[in-house]
Amino acid sequence: MADLPLAELVHALRDPERRQRIIVEHEEVARRQEGMIVDIIGSFHKLYPMEDPVDYEPRRPTRSPAGRRRPGYARSSWHWDLLVERDGNQLLYMP
């Protein structure tokens, strides 16, 4: 998939089965890690969608990952949805 043009990659990443497989795999890999990598690959609660205009001090709970997370979903689910927004051009910000 890495060699696909952006539009095709976004289409592939929107496939519900592929999305679920990747999310489950990420959760499994993240559970086996130790040290700083845990923070790098698992700190979804610190990520916010980059907005226009840019908000470098996001404080609104409805736009925070914690405020948008749905019970029963993997921590990475909401961020996955964000990454395919705007046809794959949505940036995430970790203050």
Image (cartoon, rainbow, N blue to C red):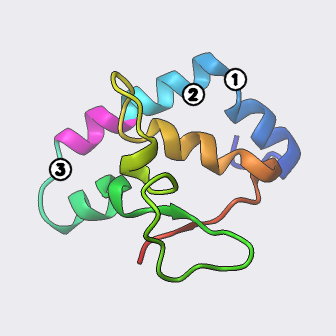
Residue 24: image x %, image y %?
Answer: 38, 27
Q: Height in image: 28 above or below 67? A: above
Identity of the residue drawn at 74% across and 31% down: 12
Residue 72: image x %, image y %?
Answer: 34, 21
**28 in magenta:** yes
Identity of the residue drawn at 34% across and 26% down: 71
Give the residue type that dot 3 points to: Gln
Between disc 3 and disc 1, the foreground one is 1
Choose top left, top right, bottom left or bottom right for residue 37: bottom left
Which label number is shown at residue 19? 2
Magenta portion: prevailing SS class: helix
Give the residue type that dot 1 points to: Asp
**Viewer-nearest residue: 9 or 44:** 44
The residue singled out by tag 1 in the image is 15
Give left or right: position of 85 versus 33.
right
Check whether the beta carbons of the residues at disc 1 and disc 2 lie within 8 A of each other.
Answer: yes
For the N terminus, the image quarter is top right
Give the magenta-colored segment's residue range: 26-31
The residue singled out by tag 3 in the image is 33
For the C terminus, the image quarter is bottom left
Distance between the Cα atoms at labels 1 and 2? 6 Å
